[in-house]
Image: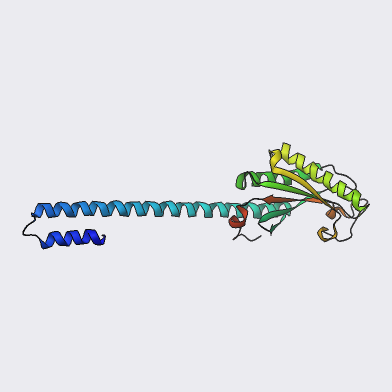
């Protein structure tokens, strides 16, 4: 009960000789109704807040389960880098080739599902890499073609809009080689002939702050 309301009741009680009992009871009933209405409004706000928190926690739990399953099923590693999520996926390329292999498409499909469910509208960058065979200039071009091949697949099969995808090449850059110095021809160095997928979204910084991979 507010101080003003309390004072009114006390005042009415102190003037009982001048105020009829029914008038006093009526005022008390009005104050009780006002207090109940206030309590209900506070409770409603609390319920709304609690519901929002519960929904956010449920979303984070579902996201963590999805990412853990994704990692376990396809041997994907996930990194948080400057507010972005980087997926190192097992999408590799044959020597001197930028053609997407049929067996690597399911992991891209799964990635597209995760993004559509939890980060609709996010910008996805496809990073292309090569092994150190050939010249640096050639490998920079080859890495771009590999990134573009995955970009095109996500645009068609994954349903991404053109404004949500971009392709960049790091070529044979040494500090990003999975197996330093490993190179073809043949299957040798295939670990370095790959792409990485990066989700860039403002919500990620807060949404995944409590997640561990």
Q: Position of residue 40 (x, y in %)?
A: 32, 52
Q: How many marks?
A: 0
Q: Position of residue 133 (x, y in %)?
A: 92, 53
Q: Position of residue 63 (x, y in %)?
A: 60, 52
Nearest the eye: 74 or 172: 172
Nearest the eye: 41 or 90: 41
Q: Position of residue 18 (x, y in %)?
A: 6, 57
Image quarter in which the N terminus is found: bottom left
Instruction: Work out which residue is located at the far top of the displayed protein and give it.
Output: 156
Residue at the image point whose x is 91% and y is 48% from the top: 138
In screen coordinates, is 146 left or right of 83?
Answer: right
Establish if 59 lies above or below 174: above
Residue at the image point whose x is 59% and y is 57% from the top: 206
The part of the image, by quadrant, that contains residue 78 is bottom right
The image's colour scheme reads rainbow
Q: Is residue 8 visible?
A: yes
The part of the image, by quadrant, that contains residue 84 is bottom right
Q: Is residue 157 visible?
A: no
Establish if 32 lies above or below 99: below
In screen coordinates, is 123 left or right of 148?
Answer: left
Nearest the eye: 31 or 66: 31
Image quarter in which the C terminus is found: bottom right
The part of the image, by quadrant, that contains residue 179 is bottom right
In screen coordinates, is 48 left or right of 71?
Answer: left
Instruction: Work out which residue is located at the far left of the displayed protein and give it.
Output: 17
């Amino acid at each position: 009960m507010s101080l003003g309301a309390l004072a009114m009741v006390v005042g009415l009680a102190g003037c009982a000789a001048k105020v009829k009992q029914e008038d006093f009871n009526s005022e008390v009933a009005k104050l009780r109704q006002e207090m109940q209405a206030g309590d209900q409004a506070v409770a409603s706000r609390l319920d709304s807040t609690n519901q929002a928190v519960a929904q956010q926690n449920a979303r984070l739990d579902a996201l963590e389960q999805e990412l853990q399953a994704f990692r376990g099923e396809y041997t994907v590693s996930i990194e948080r880098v400057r507010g972005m999520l980087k997926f190192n996926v097992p999408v590799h390329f044959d020597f001197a080739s930028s053609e997407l292999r049929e067996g690597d498409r399911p992991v891209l499909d799964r990635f597209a599902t995760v993004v559509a469910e939890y980060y609709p509208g996010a910008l996805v960058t496809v990073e292309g890499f090569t092994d150190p065979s050939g010249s640096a200039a050639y490998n920079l071009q080859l890495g771009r073609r590999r990134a573009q091949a995955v970009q095109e697949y996500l645009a068609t099969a994954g349903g991404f809009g053109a404004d949500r995808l971009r392709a960049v090449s790091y070529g044979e850059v040494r500090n990003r080689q999975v197996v330093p110095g490993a190179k073809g021809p043949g299957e040798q160095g295939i670990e370095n002939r790959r792409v990485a997928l990066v989700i860039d979204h403002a919500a990620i910084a807060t949404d995944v702050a409590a997640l561990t991979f």
